[in-house]
Image (cartoon, rainbow, N blue to C red):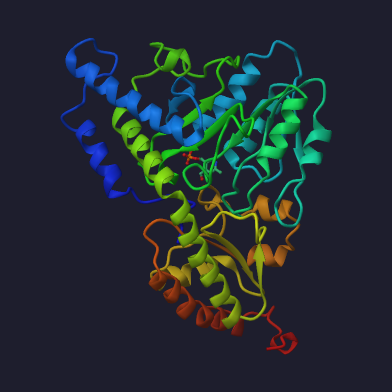
Amino acid sequence: MDHNATTPIRPEVLEAFLPYYQEKFANPSSVHAEGQETRVAMEAAREKVAALLGAKPREIVFTGCGTESDNMALRGVLAAEARTGPHIVTTATEHPAVIETCAYLETRGVEVTYVPVGRSGVIDPDDVAESIRDDTVLVSVMHGNNESGSVQPIAEIAKLVKEREKVFHTDAVQTAGKLPIDVEEMNIDLLALSGHKLNAPKGIGALYIREGLTMDALIHGGHQERNRRSGTENVAGIVALGRACELGMSHMEEESARLRRLRDRLQEGLQERIPEVEINGDPQRRLPGTLNMSFRAVGGEPLLINLDLAGVAVSTGSACASSNTDPSHVLQAMGVPKDLIEGSLRFSLGWGNTDEDVDRVVEVLPDIVARLRAVSGKWDAAKVKT
Ligand code: PLP
């Protein structure tokens, strides 16, 4: 139940991937027949990624991961900006791939406004619009949050950004292949996605770049990817990403409904059996498989370890920050009290999770919480009305 960290490769995706990892290994820039064959496969995959987003194939650039796609979007647009001291608008709950890139850009003279979010983790589009200035170059707002699961109203935000003639980027790493996206209808100029979050392998990502957008490349070399991102392409990863996007698109509706049902069953099962729990994130505008829950008077870390011993994999926040003991910047920005941040767990369901998995968690977690609370100095059982 840690699919927001990464996902398993679907068998259909592995089947598409393997021939290009084994016998069909030619460089897609080679003129010979084998090279042409891998190029054709790569371009077919580009069409599939583009179809998932409502984009044109030539607007898709393959990268190494979601982090690279976010870096390319932000740094590429800023590098092409001639003015000194330009301004970016982003939010306080972005993934480190955006936040840390903004922090780096700040050391290079860029000014950044971090728009706050409400208690549900959802941003008010007017707050974004009010932060836009004449010298604003780019607005970057993530689609679905990896920790809270909250989904931002990006179409509304992007419309306001477009009216002000600015560039809009969204980190859609947690939503691509899971929620409907149409870059034309939603006025998106740049969109980052990552293969390993949608049942493709690690090491492959993509950036949608609206045709005609001016930006610099981060990686210079052999002019691959229309000179946007040099380096011999990861053909097997690209073919796998294409297949995963195709499957994501064709199963989106039924898989979202299935995950929503499982997630809600998990939430209700835990709420019924465990007193003093709180849900973090917007109950309505939420990724279908994500449940972020706080358990009063217990630490998230002991909960995670005990669940791990029971064979259940969850997370206390984003996997990228798991070596970092600082409280989650996302829950902090949402105004979740410190003790509830400390007792928070993220369940993220995905392809392969079943009703049995949900039953297992609902069976083992109440005892774990009760045991930990029994030895917790913070737990005042008398206060709890059950
Ligand atoms: N953006 C979001 C919202 C994510 O959840 C992640 C990964 O956790 C990333 C970006 C980074 O993606 P990648 O792991 O492919 O670099």
Direction from residue 340 to residue 273 in the image, left or right: left
Q: Is residue 145 visible?
A: yes
> How far across and down, in percent of the image, does residue 20 sit?
23, 31
Which quadrant is the N terminus positioned in? bottom left
> How far across and down, in percent of the image, does residue 36 sit?
24, 16
Q: Is residue 367 above or below residue 168?
A: below
Please name whichever residue, 255 or 67, is drawn nearer the observer in this view of the structure.
255
Q: Report the residue at 66% width, 51% height from top.
A: 330
Direction from residue 63 to residue 112 in the image, left or right: right
Q: Is residue 288 above or below residue 267?
A: above
> How far across and down, in percent of the image, does residue 93 sit?
67, 46
* The image quarter in which residue 195 lies: top left
Q: Is residue 74 above or below residue 130?
A: above
Which quadrant is the C terminus positioned in? bottom right
**Count of marks, rendered view:** 0
Q: Report the residue at 44% width, 45% height from top.
A: 197
Q: Residue most toward the left?
A: 23
Direction from residue 276 to residue 124 in the image, left or right: right
Q: Report the residue at 38% width, 19% height from top.
A: 231
* The image quarter in which residue 115 lies: top right
Q: Is residue 229 above or below residue 170?
A: above
> How far across and down, in percent of the image, does residue 13 sit?
30, 43
Q: Report the residue at 68% width, 44% height from top.
A: 153
Q: Is residue 3 visible?
A: no
